[in-house]
Image: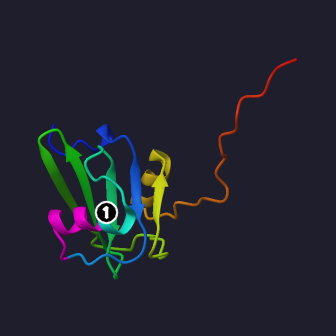
Amino acid sequence: MLGDITQAKNVYNVCGRTDMRKGIRGLTALVQQNYQMDPTDSSLFLFCGKSRSQLKALLWEPDGFILLSKQLSNGRYQWPRTAAEVQKLTWEQFTWLMQGLSVEQPKAIRPSPPKKLV
């Protein structure tokens, strides 16, 4: 299915500022060269520009790459600016990011390992 991001194994937030003029080739090269990651491993890679009002998402499907773009008409994404970092997100964090929230929600209940009942 064209652009079904729920099929992605992982979601990665490419922190810092990305040149939004880059297309598929430029973004795949960025993932490979700067972060030594494989853009064809069925992960969703997210990129954001300087203004934080636009993002691009790169996803490998079995027959090629798909590039999605979203331009906000109002507001900005809460985008981490640590430039030399790729941040692995949970789907919950991805949802927060798309809602304009920070991926680090201090009041969210974090999952913990199961405890043994005695």
| Residue nearest the viewer, comparing 19 with 78 | 19
Residue at the image position 45 percent from the left and 73 percent from the top: 84
Numbered range of the magenta stretch:
21-32
Image position, residue 39 (x, y; %): 28, 53
Image position, residue 42 (x, y; %): 29, 43
Residue at the image position 18 percent from the left and 57 percent from the top: 67
| Residue nearest the viewer, comparing 22 with 91 | 22
| Residue nearest the viewer, comparing 88 with 41 | 41
Tell me the quarter of the picture where residue 34 sits. Answer: bottom left
Image position, residue 28 (x, y; %): 23, 61
Q: Is residue 57 left or right of residue 114?
A: left
Residue at which label 1 appears: 31
Queried whether the magenta region covers residue 41, the answer comes back as no
- Residue at the extreme right: 118
Q: Is residue 81 left or right of residue 105?
A: left
Residue at the image position 48 percent from the left and 71 percent from the top: 80
Residue at the image position 14 percent from the left and 42 percent from the top: 2
- Residue at the extreme bottom: 50
Is the residue marked by circle 1 packed among few (<14), some (14-19), or many (20+) residues within 10 Å? some
Amino acid carrying label 1: it is Val
Give the SS element for disc 1.
Answer: helix
Quarter of the image where the N terminus is located: top left
Q: Main secondary structure of the magenta part?
A: helix
Image position, residue 60 (x, y; %): 22, 47
Queried whether the magenta region covers residue 29, the answer comes back as yes
Q: Is residue 28 left or right of residue 49?
A: left
Q: From the viewer's perspective, is residue 44 above or below residue 1?
A: below
Q: How is the image coloured?
A: rainbow
